[in-house]
Image (cartoon, rainbow, N blue to C red):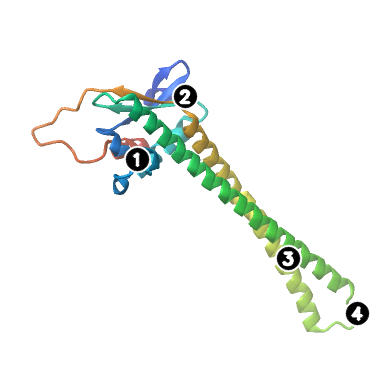
Amino acid sequence: MKQDIFSRYESHSSRRLAIDVSVGRIEELFEDFDSAASYVKKDLDQDFVDYLIESVREIGSYDFVIRINLPMHVQEKHRKRVRKSIKSYFRYLELLEQRKLRKMLWKSSLFFGLGMILLSCSMFVKENMGQNVSVIQELMAEGLTVAAWVSLWHAFANLIFELAGIFVYIRIYRRIASREVVFKEREPAKITQHGSSTKSPVVDMMKKTLAT
């Protein structure tokens, strides 16, 4: 597994891998519909975001940099704006996951509290039943018990099935937002006699990663 990762990602520096993103223009990293906004206010292209997330999942605990390959020189002011955009966007995604976490914990606490109340009511009803218990009383006691366990199950199910996933995404978003973004000039791709492809390089790169 380790050798496979090093064969798929170049080494940028000592103990750091490079997640390479090749684009023709900086604008390709952002959503087209928001082309009038400044870089900092733009949403990142979803293919670019998915590619970074999948790459970070794949490399695991290895340290990395995000290396953007462009066919031309990029001014430092534009580099700073792109770095700030990437950091701000993934900080925003992290914030959304934290909100989701708080909502899930509140929901689980609510179900847990409701379950304990229903369970207490069920025990109270059963303890105070006389010798001659009607069918309705028995159904009421059993219904309270079932409702209590259903509420408790929902409380723990949310923690079991959702909590781990939320923490994984928070960690991924935090890692991406905190990593260095570097720029590299590359040779422009040669145009064949059939013409160049119109597909986004980011899309092609992500498809190759997911396919393997």
Q: Label 3, secondary structure: give it.
A: helix
| Viewer-side label of 3, 4 | 3
Give whichever of discs 4 and 2 has the lower sequence position.
2
The amino acid sitting under disc 3 is Ala
Give whichever of discs 2 and 3 has the lower sequence position.
2
Q: CA distance from mark 2 to mark 1?
A: 40 Å
Q: Is residue 98 above or below residue 126?
A: above
Image coordinates of residue 119 in percent, x first then y, are: 78, 65
Q: Is residue 172 above or below residue 34?
A: above
Residue tagged by mark 2? Answer: 2
Q: Which of 19 and 7 lies nearest the eye of the viewer? A: 19
| Viewer-side label of 4, 1 | 1
Q: CA distance from mark 3 to mark 4?
A: 23 Å
Residue tagged by mark 3? Answer: 148
Q: How many marks?
A: 4
Q: Label 1, secondary structure: give it.
A: loop
Residue tagged by mark 4? Answer: 130
Q: Which of 41 and 6 lies nearest the eye of the viewer? A: 41
The amino acid sitting under disc 2 is Lys
| Viewer-side label of 3, 1 | 1
Q: CA distance from mark 2 to mark 3?
A: 48 Å
Give whichever of discs 3 and 1 has the lower sequence position.
1
Image coordinates of residue 205 in percent, x first then y, are: 31, 35
Q: Residues within 10 Å of mark 2 (few under 14, many from 20)?
A: few
Q: Is residue 136 above or below residue 66?
A: below
The residue lying at 8 percent from left, 33 percent from top is 193
